[in-house]
Image (tube, coloured by chain):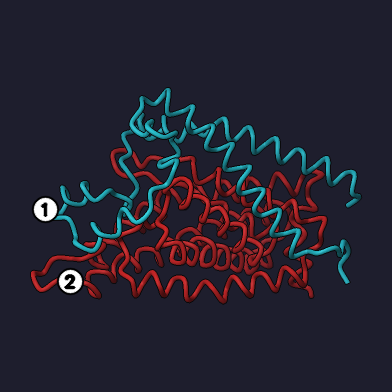
Amino acid sequence: MHIPDGYLGPPTYLAGYAVCAPLWAIAARKLKETLDARRTPLLAISAAFTFLVMMFNIPLPGGSTGHAVGGVLIAIAVGPWGAMLSVSIALVIQALLFGDGGITAIGANCFNIAFVMPFTGYYAYRLLSKALSGGKGRAIAAGIGGYVGLNVAAFTTALMFGIQPILHTGPDGRALYAPYPLSVAIHAMMIEHLVLFGVAEALVTGLAVFHLDNSRSAWVLQASAEETRR
Amino acid sequence: MTPARGSRELRKFWVVLIVLAFLTPLGIYLPKLLQGGGAWGEWGVEEVEKMIGYAPRGMKKLADFWKAPLTGYALPGQESAPASRLSVSYVLSALLGIVVCGGGAWLLGRWLAGKKDRRP
């Protein structure tokens, strides 16, 4: 889901930065208002955690590979704005040091993976956890949240790929950037995420929440509840 | 949460992260074993050329915009090393990632949280 350099034309990648800049500013302001200094290490752990999770490539046998992100789990622990910042840090480091995702595409990738995913997944989780009560219910809600978050992010990523031939096709009919049309991009991205990578995300999220809820580390998951009460 | 207990719990999380770092070679071996190809939409320009018959002009120009020092989580020159040697690169990259991402987020968090250690 990390869009490399060269797949997005300037209008799209510049829009990615333009949209993310104010979102990063809002995230910083929100954390400035609400972040308890004792929870700061959780932000660090979150950034390192998502970095690692994204290294575990899962194969779709005979097809492509992908990975979970952990973005919704992080949103449940440090709130969606905290997730936006910590996942963004991991994405920037991946692009700069490891060539995973493009430099021009950092804005676009942060929008999809650090904003769309944590927010959609987190609110899906919150909606569901009202209906599903108890520790198991909460874990199931979190798992579904993870599934939803990763898939919506895969969808917005596919849109970015898919609009490139519409925006940039040479007079010779050849694509200038990502060559596949919307239908192909959406089809390819969604099938693999709906069938496999989303399930991995659901398992990571659900099992982690279940385990944390039943351990002495349950306080880790309390930020989100406190934040929304404010 | 009492600070003492909190810090013990946090230590546990860091240990889990380090264990995860040593497991990252699974991300090399599993796709190899089950013949998963590359990620969709993350092909190199040559691969795209093979797939559609030409290299998109804009893509060719932008693709080498940045040369990352540890491309593909591999030590320089090890990108196409055999899986066993690439695994070493992977674990080192993972440990470096923990330090840089964790350190970056910690600095940012400390700056944002300031000195308040209690919610108003």
Residue B9 x/y as whole percent: 80, 42
Q: Do the residues indicated by labels 1 and 2 lie within the same chain of the protein?
A: no
**In the displayed structure image, the side of residue A229 where residue A1 appears, left or right:** left
Instruction: Judge whether A217 appears above or below A115 on screen.
Output: above
Nearest the eye: B10 or B75: B75
Say which residue appears at 77% left-offset and 69% top-offset: A34
Say few, some or many: other residues with alpha carbon within 10 Å of mark 1 (under 14 / 14 to 19 / 20 or more).
few
Tag 1 secondary structure: loop
Q: Quadrant of the C terminus of chain B?
A: bottom right
Instruction: Judge whether B25 appears above or below A67 on screen.
Output: above
**In the displayed structure image, the side of residue A177 where residue A208 appears, left or right:** right
State which chain disc 2 sits on: A
Shade of chain A as shown in the rendered figure? red
Instruction: Judge whether A93 appears above or below B62 on screen.
Output: above
On residue A57, the disc is: none
Tag 2 secondary structure: loop
Nearest the eye: B32 or A48: A48
Q: Amino acid at mark 1?
A: Gly
Q: Which chain is cyan?
A: B
Say few, some or many: other residues with alpha carbon within 10 Å of mark 2 (under 14 / 14 to 19 / 20 or more).
some
| Residue with the mark numbered 1 | B53
Q: Amino acid at mark 2?
A: Thr
Say which residue appears at 48% left-offset and 58% top-offset: A150
| Residue with the mark numbered 2 | A169
